[in-house]
Amino acid sequence: MLETFLFFVFAVLSVVGALGMLISRSPVAAALWMVQVMLAIACLYLTLNAAFIGVVQVLVYAGAIMVLFLFVIMLLNLEDMPSVGGIDWRKVVAGVLGVAVLAQLLALVVVRFGAIPDAPSAEEAVAATDVPYLGVALLTEHAFTLQIVGVLLLAATIGAVVLAKKRFV
Amino acid sequence: MPELLVSIWEAVDLPLAIFLVINLLLVTASLLVYAERVVSAFIQERSGPNRVGPRGILQPFADVFKLIFKEDIVPTAGNGFVHSLAPVLMVVIAMSTVAVIPFAGTAEAGPVVIADVSVGLLLILAMTSISVYGITLAGWSSNSKYSLLGGLRSSAQMISYELAMGAAALSVVLYAGSLSIFDIVESQNHLGSFFGWNIFRNPVGFVVFAVCALAETNRAPFDLPEAEQELVGGYHTEYSGMKFGMFFLAEYVNLWIASMVTATLFLGGYLLPGQSLLVEWFGLGGLLLTALQMVALVAKTAFFAFCFIWIRWTLPRFKYDQLMTLGWKYLLPISIANIFVIALIVTAYVLLGGDPPSPFSL
């Protein structure tokens, strides 16, 4: 009961954070809203019994990636974006209609193909995010995918080094 | 009636424990401030604090009263909300890490801990990695170039040393086979629970972890974020009054927690030296064992805290390039190689059917 309640609290917090990131005019404030989104999502994982994924979400996204974002934004010393003058109601209507069409399409996909799987029980969820289970699954069942991801990350790293070494004259 | 009392006790025992631990941490921080002054005075052959109370023991409290009564100044050109948020973040994050560290425990009775989390070690690393926000935001919201440079240095430094720290922690996980802090401590409870401690099984990991812990707490010789000579006060230049006091508090709580984590991961945590033998020969157990274990944990932590203070007043500060060279070119490759070696040792033991992997049991 408490977990369901907390789930919705953090769901609201993450949506509020996402809206704040979109609306705020200062880049640093936008990054801070983004941090709130990351932390709220981590708490969502925790309420869903996925402690490992929740903590890794904090460690990787909130702790490393967003710190780098903030670091770069502060180094660049960006000006605030000009505040929005008036609201263009035609764009608002267009956005609402777009979301409505998307919702219809998704509902159709779900109804037609039954795309939502049955929710696993709490015990199954805990077992599936157990660290040894994840490790074994990654190194046996998904070993090939893991290798591909590794090569991809290596390529990105090498690309970054090449770009950094390049002399821009 | 007893049922009611029991249910009341069950409702308040955890909040009570948390209240107690937080207040003990506050007292510890003031004791550490005093210890730092006394040790630095001893190293520099000065008298040190000797005016407030017997042997100056009340000096930290005098400092806190002075800070409370000072005016709190918020830079007008800065961001007031973030300026107030940053010191709170620092203190809250520093204090919450202690929740996952077991203060005592046995394999039969389970741990004495506030939150027995299955991924406790990762939680500690995550807390460490988000504590950089406090310093970075303090630097940015002050709208001062010295503060900003201090904040930027701090985030670069903490990101760099986090990797080596995580890799060193991983080598501990390999021995324990679990991310739970309690399991990690209990995995060191063999070979008379002294030679099984990770400092003997994994000396390289210990050195790397201790250096990284020093860097993560931003203490000398890694105190570039607050280098007085070039940055005035670094990230807290624009802070005054109790907000500055909160940074001060967070620094000492972080020092204590870093010592406690190092002691837990590498020095057997709450384990008494020779605990398994004491239990076997004298039938030690129950409340006496728990109390002795708490004393052992505090003693180990105090030892590391003393070492950190000693290092601060002995070594000069690194230059920025030396900092980056040490972090990326030495500590990170060493800790990755260490993981590889430890993984080989553990694999060899598993293949040979042996249980406790330790070089002393060969």
Image (tube, coloured by chain):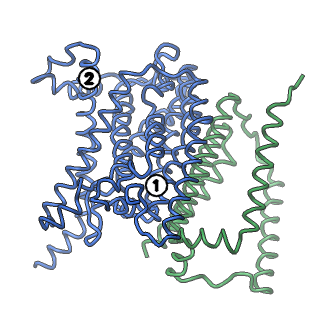
Chain colours: A green, B blue
Same chain letter for marks 1 and 2: yes
Q: Amino acid at mark 1?
A: Val
Q: Is residue A86 left or right of residue B224?
A: right
Percent x, y for residue B238? 46, 22
Disc with the residue nearer the chain's start (1 vs 2): 2
Disc 2: CA contacts within 10 A as few (<14), some (14-19) or many (>=20): some
Q: Where in the figure is residue A162, as x and y percent of width and height?
A: 83, 37
Residue to which mark 2 is pinned:
B37
**Res A14 quadrant in image:** bottom right
Q: Give the vertical position of B120 relative to B163 (above or below).
A: below
Marking on residue B272: none
Label 1 close to label 2 by CB (< 8 Å): no
- Say which element carries label 1: helix
Furthest-front residue in this view: B362
Task: Give whichever of B124, A161 is nearer the camera.
Answer: A161
Q: Is residue B49 left or right of residue B102?
A: left
Disc number for residue B172: 1
Q: Nearer the viewer, residue A153 or B271?
A: B271
Above-or-below relation of B148 to A28: above
Q: Who's the residue at 54% across and 31% down the image?
A: B154
Three-letter code for the amino acid on which mark 2 is drawn: Arg
Quarter of the view holding residue B28: top left
